[in-house]
Amino acid sequence: MKVIIVGGVAGGASAAARLRRLDENAEIILLERGEYISFANCGLPYYIGEVIKNKEKLVVQTPEKMEKRFNIDVRTLHEAVDIDSNQKQITIHDIKNDKNYKESYDKLILAPGAAPIKPSIKGFVAPNVFTLRDIPDTLAIKNFVDTHNPKSAVIVGAGFIGMELVENLHRRGMAITIVELAEQVLAPLDSEMASLIHQHLKEKKVEFYLNDEVKEVKHRDEFSLVKLNSGREIKTDMILIGIGVCPEITLAKIAGLEIGGRGGIKVDRFLKTSNPDIYAVGDAIEVIDYINGNPTLIPLAGPANKQGRIAANNIYGIPEKYEGSQGTSVLKVFDMTVATTGNSEKLLKRFDIPYEKSFTHSSAHSEYYPDANVISMKLLFSPDNGRVLGAQIVGYEGVDKRIDVLATAIRAGMTVYELEKLDLAYAPPYSSAKDPINMAGYVASNILKGDHAIIHWDKIEKIDKKKTILLDVRHPSEFKRGTIKGSINIPLDELRNRINEIPKNKNVIIFCKQGLRGYIAYKIMKQKGFKNIKNLSGGYRTYFPAVQKQDNPDIFQYEKIEKSDLIKASESFFRKK
């Protein structure tokens, strides 16, 4: 058996290692057009930010180690340029010696990855304009920062790479400006969860423009001038483009392989392409969304690693299906962590999938133990059977382990009723006796059982205020600090004695800080004969950030930026709020 793998990193390298474990006698060739066959692409921004000090730490596997341990014929600086699928031959360009040659194959695995999207905008080709995909890109960016000591940067795009660059360049003492075409950062999040990140970016003195895009860039001796569609002009020292990636499908097209509707290589559940002797894995392929069953693109390292192993198994007659991806991800944004799994509300709406949602704000560990921080969680679930469809979490600690629990719950087909019953580890430094996962299960279950009628933050502005009372049951001191316009304040502990102040012939929307006091008030009022009452899901903690101005424009004047001030602002990089 002779297998050629095009591309290393996650999918290609894992396929090569698995192939060797399955067959000691196979001829396995791994082609990589760059110098590095397997590197920590998720760690690249942290090398730029000098969190990772040693460049060698980014190299997961070297050609020499791969050859020695797995007996793989690793050919770096060799690019596959043509595939004759009828003859089962591949044309390879030896970049170092500038010559082409051919290799035959029995089976071929394509793992070309995805390339950064770089729009054709005037001024985007310049020595101070960068994209980030691999180690050479990383070294170029870090060298520019080390050499030129820039005091500002514009980051175009606020996806995962863009946000990691925001944090790490900010850590280097630079004034950061984000330009994002969408109405929020981090598109996988729903808007109210993204609003929590917006508030944190404001705290960190990050300037950002939403619903705007770069029109052109003019480069001058002292600075570059970034012109936006809105008419704004931003002076900056460097520009980084992080607006997303697109699948590398050039070779697939040459081979005559079928391309899917989302622009990736189309594969079946066994990761086989439209040609039975060619498999494809990683960021270049379309996968099935585990929740909604539709083709999608999931450019993440975790799925790519699993796909490489599965493709190798199938080549050797060990049938294994790739069951789809739920897009589980986690991201550090300064002091906060944001994580998602399954489908967002936006996706469920797009595919007309019925859903219900809940918001909870729970302590990451016991409140009496020092430094307890809040975990904000959005849970999406089926209104029919309670099956968990998706989750988003934002917080300062414990976010990663909670999203992993929910990712497992989704994969196991669990319901919100089962989340209530999960027996999760507890000790005061790590959790509460009722873990945030349990609390989310309780709230969602109460909604489905009809024990708790709720209203969501985005419906508040649409209510008939002449027929509705907004009842704030927080403490008067909380009420004074801010409330929903038009609300009355009756603290929960006074509600039973003052309940006659609330007319029963009106609709009542109850809210508190996070939802719990509102739920208790709801139960009291329901048993006192109030019919038309609802509790605001997630309380004021969900409502307030979501209705604020989301962008943060015009906070810097280029001429007045003092780098030392920005370095001081970055000193809290590793501190919790």
Image: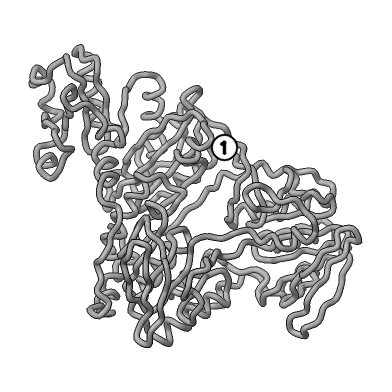
Residue for point 16% across, 15% down: 504
- Helix, strand or loop for disc 1: loop
Residue 152's place in the image compared with 489, above or below, is below
Q: Alpha-carbon neighbours of circle 1 within 10 Å: few (<14), some, or many (≥20)?
A: many
Q: Amino acid at mark 1?
A: Ile
Q: Quadrant of residue 59?
A: bottom right
Residue for point 52% across, 75% down: 138
Q: Nearer the viewer, residue 107 or 558?
A: 558
In x, y percent, where is residue 387?
51, 29
Q: Nearer the viewer, residue 120 or 246?
A: 120
Residue 347's place in the image compared with 54, above or below, is above
Residue for point 66% across, 70% down: 61
Can residue 439 be seen in the rendering of this structure?
no
In x, y percent, where is residue 440?
39, 34
Question: In this view, which residue lies farthest toward the top?
Answer: 529
Q: Which colour style is shown?
A: one colour
Q: Quadrant of the N terminus?
A: bottom right
Q: Quadrant of residue 94?
A: bottom right
Can residue 242 be seen in the rendering of this structure?
yes
Q: Which residue is mark 1?
A: 291
In x, y percent, where is residue 400?
45, 50
Instruction: Please state if 254 lies on the left or on the right of 239 as rendered.
Output: right
